Image: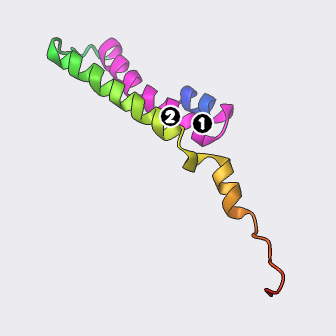
Amino acid sequence: MFLVQSAMNAGRLIAAQPGLTLSDPIVSILWGVLVFGERVRGGWYVALAVVSGLVMTAAVVVLARSPLLSDESARQEEEPRPVREGQG
């Protein structure tokens, strides 16, 4: 809860959401292993988890930098178009 409140206090949701998306599975795994004593499989399972994490990180970075999420695209849509002479 502290992480969510700190992220929301730091700025807009668009800036905070990627960090929350990446940290949620990591925090969940740490809670399971450290607090509840769950076992983590080794071998290929770890490699698969690391590759999946890297793919998820890349996808979050690409989505966070999307021009559709920036204020500039919203401002361009909201700006009124100038009326040409002869048009009413």
Q: Does the magenta stretch include residue 10?
A: yes
The residue carrying pointer 2 sits among few (fewer than 14), some (14 to 19) or many (20 or more) residues within 10 Å by Cα, namely some
- Camera-side residue: 30 or 86? 86
Rendered residue at 52%/38% (across/down): 64
In the displayed structure image, the side of residue 39 where residue 24 appears, left or right? right
Is residue 69 positioned above or below 7 on the image?
Answer: below
Q: Name the residue under label 2.
A: 18
Q: Do the residues labelled 1 and 2 touch (CB within 8 Å)?
A: yes
Q: Position of residue 59 (x, y in %)?
A: 40, 35
**Circle 1: element type:** helix
> Considering the numbered disc 2 on the image, is that residue within a helix, a strand or a loop?
helix
Region of the chain picked out in magenta, as a range: 8-35
Label disc, if present, on residue 73 of the rendered structure = none
The quadrant where residue 88 appears: bottom right
Dot 1 crowding, Cα within 10 Å, few <14, some 14–19, many 20+: some
Assess whether residue 85 is covered by the magenta stretch.
no
- The amino acid on which the numbered mark 2 sits, given as a three-letter code, is Pro
How many discs appear?
Answer: 2
